[in-house]
């Protein structure tokens, strides 16, 4: 099992994400944004949180056009797994691997706290270890987590069971309280909360650890 | 030559920042501000011969996120 974690100037959750993957038994390679290829045999690419390229222009927009993201998109298009967390989720929407966009929080505040997160579907390699409706305690730390998409897209996501996580309470104005969505093949997941920050008893919650463990258990070769 | 790109949120996309500016204007005593939408102006210095189509490509690929934003291009 081999995971790659992308590193952009301004990424700051890359090493935490590496630790979370390693705990679950992955070999982890860090890949620099200027790299044009992923290491051979990578099963899953993690796109970490942070402030890639200073959040200039739009969060994730410049990272989404970095050389490594061409390799990332190709990996996803041939059925590889991708996990984008926080700024990583913003990057994935900017690459259009995931629908919608993340806008400024409705209350305009940076929100940094543990939130109750509802698992909407166990039907993915990321969520198979959770029960439908299970409530997790996972931290969020974002200024731009207000998920938007047009009504038709939202209906399609819900109809296809591609909303992976929802906030138990509205925190940031996100449409239908959506916190995480999946691609059509259910192998690309983006979410604003940070499961890698709830993966060790010292974090105060270990509810995120299962995501990495289920991914390790449920990988199907691309 | 220069190009000026205006990027605005599409109609129907809520603009929390614009809303906050509207409230702030109200509390400064400016009555009758019924809506504020905030966008970006991007000025590009371009080599002669760059076409409007080139600038539109720049908008599609990077300058605007057409999921939520619309843009206009002016060349001068």
Image (tube, coloured by chain):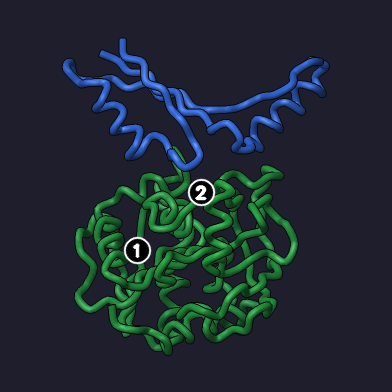
Chain colours: A green, B blue
Q: Examine the image and state in which quarter residue A120 appears.
A: bottom right
Residue bearing mark 1: A6
Q: Nearer the viewer, residue A141 or A75?
A: A75
Say which chain tag 2 marks: A
Residue at the (32%, 85%) spot, across then down: A1
Residue A98 at x, y percent in the picture: 44, 57
Whether A203 is drawn above or below A66: the answer is below
Badge 1: residue crowd in 10 Å (few <14, some 14–19, many ≥20): many
Residue A39 at x, y percent in the picture: 22, 72
Residue at the (58%, 31%) spot, across then down: B11
Task: Please state, as top left, top right, bottom left or bottom right, where the C terminus of chain A lies in the image.
Answer: bottom left
Residue at the (42%, 54%) spot, across then down: A91
Q: Secondary structure at mark 1?
A: strand
Whether A106 is drawn above or below A30: the answer is above
Residue A59 at x, y percent in the picture: 47, 46
Residue at the (68%, 45%) spot, across then down: A106
- Hey, which residue is sitting farthest left in the picture? B49
Question: Looking at the image, is mark 1 or mark 2 earlier in the sequence?
Answer: 1
Q: Are marks 1 and 2 in contact (CB under 8 Å)?
A: no
Front tag of 1 and 2: 2
Whether A216 is drawn above or below B11: the answer is below
Residue A14 in sight from this viewpoint: no
Q: Is residue A123 left or right of residue A218?
A: right
- Hey, which residue is sitting farthest top in the picture? B76
Say which chain tag 1 marks: A
Residue A137 in sight from this viewpoint: yes
Q: Is residue A208 left or right of residue A62?
A: right
Q: CA distance from mark 1 to mark 2?
A: 20 Å
Tag of residue B22: none
Badge 2: residue crowd in 10 Å (few <14, some 14–19, many ≥20): many
Residue bearing mark 2: A101
């Amino acid at each position: 099992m081999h995971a790659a974690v992308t590193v952009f100037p301004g990424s700051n959750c890359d090493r935490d994400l590496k630790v979370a993957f390693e705990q679950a038994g992955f070999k982890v390679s860090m890949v620099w944004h200027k790299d044009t290829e992923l290491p051979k045999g990578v099963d899953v690419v993690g796109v970490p949180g942070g402030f890639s390229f200073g959040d200039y222009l739009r969060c994730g927009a410049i990272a989404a056009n970095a050389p490594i993201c061409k390799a990332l998109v190709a990996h996803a298009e041939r059925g590889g797994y991708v996990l984008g967390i926080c700024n990583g989720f913003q990057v994935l929407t900017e690459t259009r691997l995931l629908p919608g966009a993340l806008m400024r929080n409705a209350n305009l505040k940076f929100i940094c706290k543990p939130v109750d997160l509802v698992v909407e579907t166990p039907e993915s390699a990321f969520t198979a270890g959770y029960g439908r409706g299970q409530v997790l305690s996972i931290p969020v730390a974002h200024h731009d987590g207000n998920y938007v998409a047009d009504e038709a897209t939202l209906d399609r996501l819900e109809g296809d069971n591609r909303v992976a996580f929802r906030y138990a309470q509205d925190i940031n104005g996100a449409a239908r309280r959506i916190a995480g969505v999946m691609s059509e093949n259910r192998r690309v997941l983006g979410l604003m909360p940070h499961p890698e920050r709830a993966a060790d008893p010292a974090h105060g919650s270990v509810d995120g650890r299962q995501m990495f463990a289920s991914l390790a258990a449920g990988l199907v070769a691309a | 030559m220069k190009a000026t790109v205006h990027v605005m949120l599409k109609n129907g996309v809520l603009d929390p920042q614009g809303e906050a500016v509207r409230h702030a204007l109200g509390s400064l005593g400016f009555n009758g501000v019924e809506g504020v939408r905030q966008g970006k102006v991007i000025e590009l210095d371009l080599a002669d011969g760059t076409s409007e189509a080139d600038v539109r490509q720049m908008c599609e690929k990077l300058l605007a996120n057409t999921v939520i934003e619309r843009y206009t291009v002016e060349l001068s």
